[in-house]
Image (cartoon, rainbow, N blue to C red):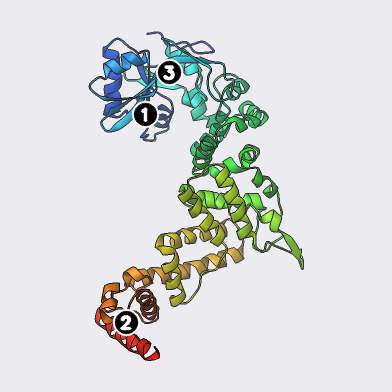
Amino acid sequence: MSGVEGASGGSFFSPDMRITMPGYVREIIDRLTSRGFSAYAVGGAVRDCVLGLYPDDWDVASSALPEEIESAFSDYRVIETGIKHGTVSVVAGGNVVEITTFRKESGYSDNRHPDAVEFVGDVAEDLRRRDFTVNSLAYNEKCGLIDLYGGLSDIENKIIRTVGNAEERFSEDSLRILRAVRFSSKLGFRIEEKTLAAAEKLKGGLKNVSAERIFSELLKTLCGKDVLNALMNYREIIAEIVPEIRPCFDFDQHSKWHLYDVYEHIARATSSITPEPALRTAMFLHDIAKPAAFFMKDGEGHFYGHADMSTAVAEKILKRLKAPVAFREKVLFLIKNHDAPFPESNFKLKRLLGEIGEEAFFDLVKVKYADNKAQGTDVAIAESEKTAKITEKVQKIIESGECYSLKMLNVSGDELASIGFKGKEIGDELNVLLTACMETPSLNDNARLKELAEKHFVRLNKRA
C-alpha cells in the first residue's frame, strides 16, 4: 500500500508503528474488518499511546453505518449513544467503546453542534473534521498509524494546533477553545501561535456553550499536570469563563507574605495541591476576592475578610457553572477556612476533628501547604512548619485511637437510658462524657463512663 494522502499531500501511512491496544478494542476492530468494513482506533487514546501512556477510554471509527454496527454486535450489549450522528456504544469486556461512522460535518449555527452530518466511507475525511492534530490520529494493526495532519510532529514538538484553519475550527465549536487550554494543561504542550490568536479572538463564543460543559473542561484543565503554565499563558481565555478572576491579574499584594501577585499566587497554589477536582478548584478560587478586600496600612497590604468574601464569590461562580451541590459545599468549606489557623492544644484539635472529620482536616492541611508554598517567602515556610507540627499531633491522636466523636465513645444512648436519662438528657450527657474523654483519654472505658454517668444522674436529680 502506497499510503494515505493527507491535506498537504505525500505519504502519511506508518505500517511499522505499533501501539498496544486492549484485547477488547482489537476484537471490535477485527469483527468490523472481518465483515468488510474499515475500522480504526482514533483520537485521544491513540495520542496517549504514542506518548507512552495507558488510556482507559477508547473510541473506534468505522466505515460501517450505525445499523451495520448494531448488526455486527448483536450478541453484545449495544447502546444507541448518538445514533443520528453515527455513534453506537458497544459494551465489551466490561468496557464501553464508542464506535462512530466516518463522517463529515457542516453548518454550526450555534457555534457548538453541526447542523448536518454526512456519513462518508473515507477515514481521511473523518480525521479532517477533528479538533486538533494530536487527536487526528487513527490506528489498526493491519495499517499501522495514519497521521494525515502532522499530529506526530506536533506531539514530538509538544504543540496544540487545530486541524486546518483555526478560526474555522473554533467558529464551528467554541468549546474547542477551552479544549485547547485543557490539552495544554494535561499534556504540557503549548498552543501554537495562530491557534492561540484565533482562540483569543473568538473566545466570546464560549457564551454559547452550556455551563455544564464549561465546568467539565475547567475541572480537567485545573487537574492537568501543567496547570501552572496553562493558567498563566492562557489567562484571557480563563477569564472569559470566570470573569471574576480578572481583577487578580498583576495585582501587587504589597505583603511580606507574598512574592507573587494575586493571580500568579492563585495559579501556583492550584498547581501545588493534589490534582483532585475539589482541591484544585478550591485553590483556584481561594483568593479570588483579594483585590476587593485590599487596603494599605503602614506600608503593608492587608486583606481582612478576604476568605469570607472569596467564599461568597466562589459560591456564585460554582452555582453559575452548575457544580453539584456536594462538590460546591466541599470547595466552599475549604475556601472559607483556608486562612484560619489550626488550634494547637490536643483538646481543641480533637474538638475540630469531631466537628469536621478526618478527611476535611487533611484536605485543609493540603490547602494550607499549597497556599504557603505558592507564597514563596520565608515567613510562609515558617507557617508550613507550624502546620506540619499540628498535623503530627493529629496523626498521633488518630493512631492512638483517642476519642473525639460520639461514635468513638464507649457507651451508648441505650445504656444511659437504662441509668435513667430521658429524651434530650441522653444527648446532653453523651456530649458531657465526650468532653471528659477528650480531656482525659483513659476515661473512654465502658465501665468508667457508666459510673461517671450514674454520678451525673444523681447530681442532676438532686438539683431537680
The local crowd at label 2, few if under 14, some if 14 to 19, many if 20 or more residues have their Cα within 10 Å, is some
User: Would you name the residue on which mark 2 appears?
Assistant: 443
Q: How much space separates mark 1 and mark 2, taking CA atoms?
A: 57 Å
Q: Is residue 122 left or right of residue 249?
A: left
The residue shown at (49%, 11%) is 10
User: Would you name the residue on which mark 3 appears?
Assistant: 84
Asked where in the image residue 349 lies, by quadrant, the reply is: bottom left
The local crowd at label 3, few if under 14, some if 14 to 19, many if 20 or more residues have their Cα within 10 Å, is few
The residue shown at (27%, 33%) is 94
The three-letter amino acid code for the residue at tag 2 is Leu
Q: How much space separates mark 3 and mark 1, taking CA atoms?
A: 20 Å
The residue shown at (48%, 58%) is 366
**From the viewer's perspective, is residue 114 above or below residue 231?**
above
The quarter of the rendered structure image containing the N terminus is: top left
Dot 3 falls on a residue whose secondary structure is helix
Whole-percent x and y of residue 249? 68, 47
User: Would you name the residue on which mark 1 appears?
Assistant: 58
**Foreground disc of the pair 2, 3:** 3
Q: How much space separates mark 2 and mark 3, taking CA atoms?
A: 68 Å
Which tag, 3 or 1, sits closer to the chain's start? 1
The three-letter amino acid code for the residue at tag 1 is Trp
State whether residue 132 appears in this view: yes
**From the viewer's perspective, is residue 289 above or below residue 239?**
below
**From the viewer's perspective, is residue 347 above or below residue 281?**
below
**From the viewer's perspective, is residue 416 above or below residue 121?**
below
Whole-percent x and y of residue 68? 32, 13
